[in-house]
Amino acid sequence: MTQEPSTTNWYEVVQKPHPLLIVISGPSGVGKDALVKRMKERNVPFHFVVTATSRPPRPGEVNGKDYIFVSKEKFREMLEKGELLEHAIVYGEYKGIPKSQVLDAIASGKDVIMRLDVQGAATVRKLIPQAITIFLMTSTEEELVRRLSMRHTESSEALAKRLAAAKAEMERLPEFDYVVVNKDNELDVAVDKVLSIVTAEKCKVKPREIKFNLQVQK
């Protein structure tokens, strides 16, 4: 008995664009912002989601590029209008992802990169189960403590709270798809690992199909 030839055009199937949603997460101080900044400097072809936050800018940060800096009143207004994909209160300040940036980029076929704290990554995982979640970490706890201490932007009490939160967040590493160690002075190595993860996902026979479960709310 002869087998009927396949009518599927596998060349079209394989080359069909499958935009990915990549979440870069991890405790404070592991270098999420630095990693994303370096990826932008290397002109990787992704859409980088800009997070809205009520905290004041740090030295060198640019509104609309590094973060969307808004007042707490404006943030609450965005929340009431349903403009945020996810949101959280982090160390007394609001942070959230504007829906339009993610939805519009995915619809246009672009891969999307977003940086989130561990709590935000869990929310996105519920909303978009096909998202690729990458946990960024330092090589040692001592290295993390040193990085946080070098900021000199917080009181000793605030720093102690941030360190305690970082230890708790480390326990959630098993919830993620991948882990990347961001060692001191090896930022490009960490970037290369993230790009390798994206490349591997693009080569899957059954690629991820991004679907939004916007009925799930935080």
Image (cartoon, rainbow, N blue to C red):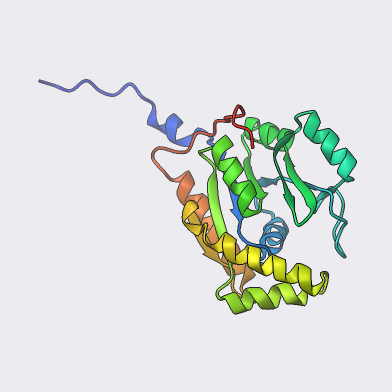
Q: Is 13 on the left-hand or right-hand side of 119?
A: left
Residue at image position (86%, 63%) is 60
User: Can you name the residue that lies furthest to the left here?
Assistant: 1
Q: Quadrant of the C terminus?
A: top right
Image coordinates of residue 149 in percent, x first then y, are 74, 76
> Which residue occupies the foreground of this view, 130 or 27?
27
The image shows a total of numbered marks equal to 0
Image coordinates of residue 111 in percent, x first then y, are 61, 42
Q: Is residue 17 visible?
A: yes
Image coordinates of residue 150 in percent, x first then y, are 76, 77
With respect to residue 87, does 10 lie above or below? above
Residue at image position (38%, 31%) is 10
Q: Quadrant of the N terminus?
A: top left
> Which residue occupies the foreground of this view, 209 or 99?
99
Image coordinates of residue 142 in percent, x first then y, are 61, 79
- Residue 80 found in image quarter: top right
Q: Is residue 51 visible?
A: no
Residue at image position (84%, 54%) is 55
- Residue 34 found in image quarter: bottom right
With respect to residue 131, does 4 lie above or below? above
With respect to residue 73, does 214 lie above or below? above
Residue at image position (40%, 37%) is 206
